[in-house]
Amino acid sequence: MGDRGLPPGLGRRRDPAAGPPPGIGGWSEGVRLLDRLRLLNGWDGFLARLRLTDDVAMRLAERARVNRTCLHSELLSSGIVPEDAHFRALSAELGLPFLDAIDPARLLTGEAGALAALRSARGSGMSLLENGGAETLLVIAPVKLDIIAFKALLARRPRLASRLVVASPSTLRAALLARVHAHLLREACRGLFNVWPAMSARFITDSWQAFFVGVAIVAVPVLLFLAPVVTALSVYACFSTLFLGCIGLRLASAVSETIGDEVRLGARPADADLPAYTVLVALHSEAEVIPDLLAALAGLDWPRSKLEIKLVCEEDDEATLAAIGRQTLRPWVEVIKVPPSEPRTKPKALSFALPLAGGELIALYDAEDRPHPMQLREAWARFRDEGDDLACVQAPLSITNGRYGILPFMFRLEYAALFRGILPWLSSNDLLIPLGGTSNHFRGLMYQEHQTSGSGKAVIPLQSARGLTDG
């Protein structure tokens, strides 16, 4: 039939370079404008209290449209308005009292409820508060809010409105943290041992390992005394075999075609499809690198309303905490202070902070790391494309001071061989992959609750690890 009976231009293929048909671009812009106005609906009084211009409001609405969030969360994560002023204005707009501080002893929320609130988006949520013999109060610190629906709820339920008070998320979060501090510390120190003793480092060796070590300690000196030459040759042969095994592993990975190259992400995914991401950074005596660390983390390409960065630091590490205090932290950065206790290790500090992670994905970094800005997006793309059986991906580490001497150069060479050759070869052959202590990305579900099998033992679904772009 050809093009007969059709409007001009609709029966023929259009050149993609020619752009959309006439009028379509204006229509799309009109749809986006209507979406922004819908997101702004009901917020005019609140925005007026904060004295935000129409231009700022429209930019926040556009960001909420793109990220598929709400105006309230985008304004909060932007840092345009201080959190305290933000929630004071919100409480005034809703006609509810505002709490400057919360006594943790007055919270009626149990440990399980407090942990659930702390794991939610930046610790938002609500909590019951004892009111000195009067009717119990309900403290709210919403990060996501439909203000029209909430005002309608308050109008329909005046008794509920009389019990509601507003607090900032930081204020409520501090009270909830104080409530569960002892629990978090107890679980960080003994939780893994109580649930899965075999995976804990509390006991360095099991009974059989201790037995064979004891036999070796006794047998080697006796054999050296009785047959020194044969014993020395035997010990030399054992260690040589281990050494040759290490060399063989490197040669096998070197001659294989499996090389860890940088991955091209392809089309940029829509921000609306991205999940919440938690970044944990363990710090200890790291005062000098704090400014560079925060600058590198600020460069991560991820919607700020879906990102939470937690700096995990010992409570008595005064120098590091003072260095952090000298910086202006964005709303999506939080300092987690670990109470001083033994063992003073990185695993214990991270175990203290992990129950507070609200992201679907979790990344672990060190203070010296300077992650590639696109690393979070690539990790998410790997998890999305590889399926649910992928529990962890590991980013390669690149040493940047290799030109400052022979030792740093050899260090850089060793890391390049490990991350560009050995680990990709192990992964391609479905062999056990050693994880480093940093630049690892996990599915957050691993840390939300212990999965248990029928035997009652905890099951952690860590099945594979794959490489990413440079950290």
Image: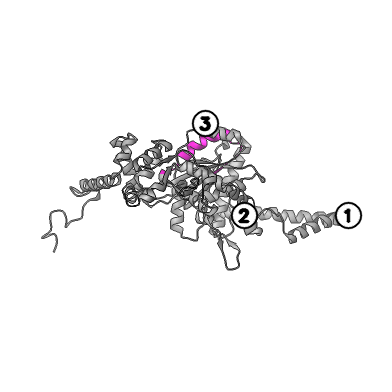
Look at discs 1 and 2 and give the one toward the viewer: 2
Secondary element at image label 2? helix
Q: Is residue 218 something one can see in this rendering?
A: yes
Asked if the magenta segment contains residue 370, the reply would be no
* Residue 455 shown left or right of residue 121 in the figure: right
Identify residue type, mark 2: Gly
Secondary element at image label 3? loop
Q: Is residue 417 something one can see in this rendering?
A: no
Asked whether the beta carbons under mark 1 and mark 3 sit within 8 Å of each other, the answer is no
Neighbor class of circle 2 (other Cα within 10 Å; few <14, some 14-19, many 20+) is some
Q: Closer to the camera, 113 or 337?
A: 113
Q: Residue at x 54, y 38 (%)?
A: 400
Residue 360 lies, in percent from the top left, at: 47, 53
Identify residue type, mark 1: Phe
* Residue placed under numbered mark 3 in the picture: 326
Is 434 drawn above or below residue 59 in the view shown? below
Name which quarter of the figure residue 169 lies in: top left
N-terminal label among 2 and 3: 2
Q: Which residues are magenta?
A: 280-304
Mark 1 to mark 3: distance in Å? 64 Å
Look at discs 1 and 3 and give the one toward the viewer: 3
* Residue placed under numbered mark 1 in the picture: 225
Is 77 drawn above or below residue 393 in the view shown? above
* Residue 118 shown left or right of residue 273 in the figure: right
* Residue placed under numbered mark 2 in the picture: 191
* Residue 5 shown left or right of residue 438 in the figure: left
